[in-house]
Image: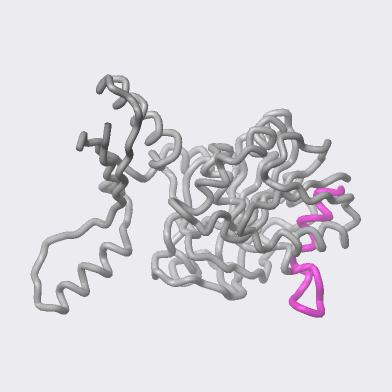
Amino acid sequence: MKFSVTVTLKKDVLDPQGKVVQNSLLNLGMNLENIRQGKYFELEINEKDQVKAEKKIDDMCKKLLVNLIIEDYKVNKL
Amino acid sequence: MKSSVIVFPGSNCDRDIGVALEKMQFKNQMIWHKETKLPKSDLIVLPGGFSYGDYLRSGAIAGKSLIIDEVVKAANDGCLILGICNGFQILTETGLLKGTLLRNKNLKFINKDIQIKVINNKTKFSNKYKKNQVLKINIAHNEGNYFTDSKHLQDLKENNLIAFKYCDRKGSVNDQSNPNGSLENIAGIYNSNKNILGMMPHPERMVDELISNTDGINLFSSLLN
């Protein structure tokens, strides 16, 4: 079973990389309100039960992939 | 006093701290991260560097390595733990210290001598310093921008757990003397028992007049006190 995990900085956490990318887009003449940079993972696990699989992925996120102090995450089945 | 320096793939300040500890008469051992047993130590040091190439997040992978379980156990038994630079990042990833280190506000790797102020001089790590003493010390990091939630920040202030703050030559703590955007200019913090110190500046680089200064010596002599 394949899942994607998207990790983004929490709303209140400053994202300097996002700010620089935003400035660069503005310089290119493209207008935008806001941009937040994040991380994307694709995970494949050997598990047929979706509920169990999602629980395992959630565990992986909490234990390693995500720093819960500063980041939020979303899991999607692919 | 016995010390152990944990070495990860990508550590690059491990030998510097080893030399500094030996100069200060510690009986030091270098411990590879794949070890599962720690020799009995009074002090464990997590050195600076770029463990695992800073993959995922600085310190994230090292924070889950085999030896870390032993470090956490020792820390909970009251062993003194010092995390410098990447070592500080590893300590936050293990949860031994709260908060985290974000990318520097200016997005640049900063390597320079700056000033820090001793905020709490009543710990095992700092008793040889004077309160508010200004030290000239080197920083070399890309993720040194300390961040934590407001509840923990309150706890740090109320319980005197802020070890050092970035300041200018005169000791003023303000935005101009903050090199990396760190919350309230924080350069180093203690855990609630004050047996764990995490700091971004490098005291091990300041133990020899020939190559720098000796402002870092008192951190090690405090430990021996």
Task: From the viewer's perspective, tell me whether residue B76 is left or right of residue B57.
Answer: right
Name the foreground residue: B66 vs A69. B66
Whether B25 is among the magenta residues is no
| Residue B198 drawn above or below residue B154 | below
Q: How many marks do you count on the picture?
A: 0
Q: Is residue B127 left or right of residue B95?
A: right
Measuring 48% from the left and 65% from the top, which residue is drawn there? B142
Whole-percent x and y of residue A6? Answer: 27, 44
Q: Position of residue B147 (x, y in %)?
A: 44, 50
Magenta-drawn segment: B206-225
- Residue A77 visible? The answer is yes
Q: How is the image coloured?
A: one colour
Decide whether residue B222 is among the magenta residues: yes
At 37% across and 45% down in the image, what residue appears?
A: A70
- In the shown orientation, is residue B62 left or right of residue A74? right
Residue drawn at x 40%, y 33% is A60
Left or right: residue A4 compared with residue B149: left
The image quarter in which residue B209 lies: bottom right
Residue B75: quadrant of the picture: top right
> In this rendering, does residue B157 appear at all?
no
Majority secondary structure of magenta residues: loop
- Picture quadrant where residue B160 is located: top right
Report x, y in % for residue A22.
20, 67
Residue at 50 percent of width and 46 percent of height: B60
Task: List x then y, in percent, for residue B23.
Answer: 88, 62
Of the 4 image quadrants, the one containing the N terminus of chain B is top right
Above or below, B204 relative to A26: above
**Residue B113 higher or lower than B17, as above or below:** below
